Image: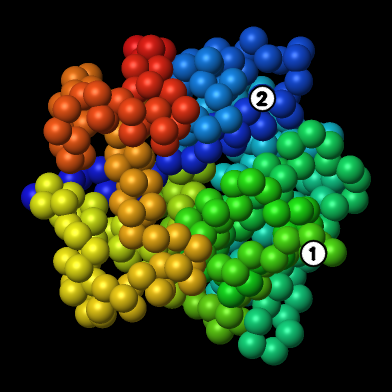
Amino acid sequence: MRDNLGARSATLPIRFVGDLLMRLGDARRERALACVRRAGIAPALLQQDTARITVEQFAHTYRLLAVELDDETPGYFSRPLRGGTLKFLCLGMLDAANLRVAMHRFCWYFRLLIDDMHYVMTQDGALTRIALVEHVALGPARELILETMLMLVQGVASWMIDRRIAFARLDLAYPQPPYAAEYMHIYPAPAHFEAPVTAFYLDSTLLDAPIRQDKAALSAFLRNAPTDWIYMSGGKRLVTHRVREHIEANLADSPSVEDVAHALHMSARTLARHLAQEGTGFQAVKDALRRDIAIARISRTDEPIASIGNRLGFDDPGSFNRAFKQWTGSPPGAYRKERG
């Protein structure tokens, strides 16, 4: 039977929360740590570079900070974006004739509100580029700001046309970070680092798509933000995504590489070659999935840790504990200490 965690089992490196706190500085650290605890994250994990959190925990922390600071981009810019900013942005886009008009409004909206950076949209034949032009040095956690603002465009645009949009190309104006492998899940597109400007490219024909949302759907979209902007796997999905989905759907049967290859209508050798081209392998995909499900279950439920390990195919608690510590740098219990 399919595990019902689905895509909600995805996790992120702890640095996403660590960078949020770094941006806020020492003066607001205690208020920020209170939000971290309320999101169910043990603050001690912030000291562990290999620790991970669920997408929901990051989104919950982000929402709590946005409310606490009355800033929907908490501490990012020289002027806060007060509560309600995203709502009014979306309201102004809903009656657009198509996504092209809506995204022009999106770009101009932020040009009016933010002094530190703005979006510029240009079309060059088959591709349209939306660039993030920086006007000032963004300071600590600059990468997080750029990453989040890219997620925002991706999330809003996808929601507007009720279709997951994948980028055709992603340019990032900073060196390749240690966590670059995460980008295949956050932005399913080829990433190019140390570019002159941060920008993404999408198929221009997507901009002709009509707006398919209305005011009635807006409340749910805003309530979930920014959860739905992260781990977008639309468009031409990578083989990695398809393998992960099949393993998760059949986790109780512990499918082998041959089982998954057969389900995807290819040989095991062909599957291995595709995964290698995407910088991963079958066991790495399987372990990442088991790690993410373990973190999600430990963080959200009171299920005994030994039982969680058994569900994931570990015959004894010791082997599960060792694997979990190898995946995250901490024992499973560290992820449950701050719950409640």
The image shows residue 281 at horizontal and vertical percentages of 39, 60
Q: Quick one: label 2 or label 1, which is nearer the N terminus?
A: 2
Q: Where, quadrant-wise, is the C terminus in this rendering? A: top left
| Secondary structure beneath label 1 | loop
Neighbour class for label 1 at 10 Å: few (<14), some, many (≥20)?
some
Q: Residue at x 63, y 13 (%)?
A: 31
- Tally of numbered tags: 2
Q: Residues within 10 Å of mark 2 (few under 14, many from 20)?
A: many
**Tag 2 residue:** 21
Q: Against 86, is 133 above or below?
A: below
Q: Position of residue 328 (x, y in %)?
A: 45, 32
User: The disc labelled 2 sits on which kind of residue?
Assistant: Leu
Circles 2 and 1: CB distance less than 8 Å? no
Question: Is residue 8 visible from the viewing direction of this image?
Answer: no
Residue that numbered label 1 is attached to: 195
Amino acid at circle 1? Ala
Residue furthest to the right in view is: 136
Establish if 313 lies above or below 339.
below
Foreground: disc 2 or disc 1: 1
CA gap between label 2 and label 1 equals 27 Å
The secondary element bearing badge 2 is classed as: helix
Residue at the bottom extreme, as displayed: 125
Q: Nearer the viewer, residue 270 or 82?
A: 270
Where residue 25 sits in the image (x, y, percent)?
76, 20
Seen in the picture, residue 189 relative to 46 is either above or below; the reply is below
Q: Nearer the viewer, residue 82 or 315?
A: 315
Give the residue at x 26% y 30%: 320
Residue 13 located left or right of residue 284: right
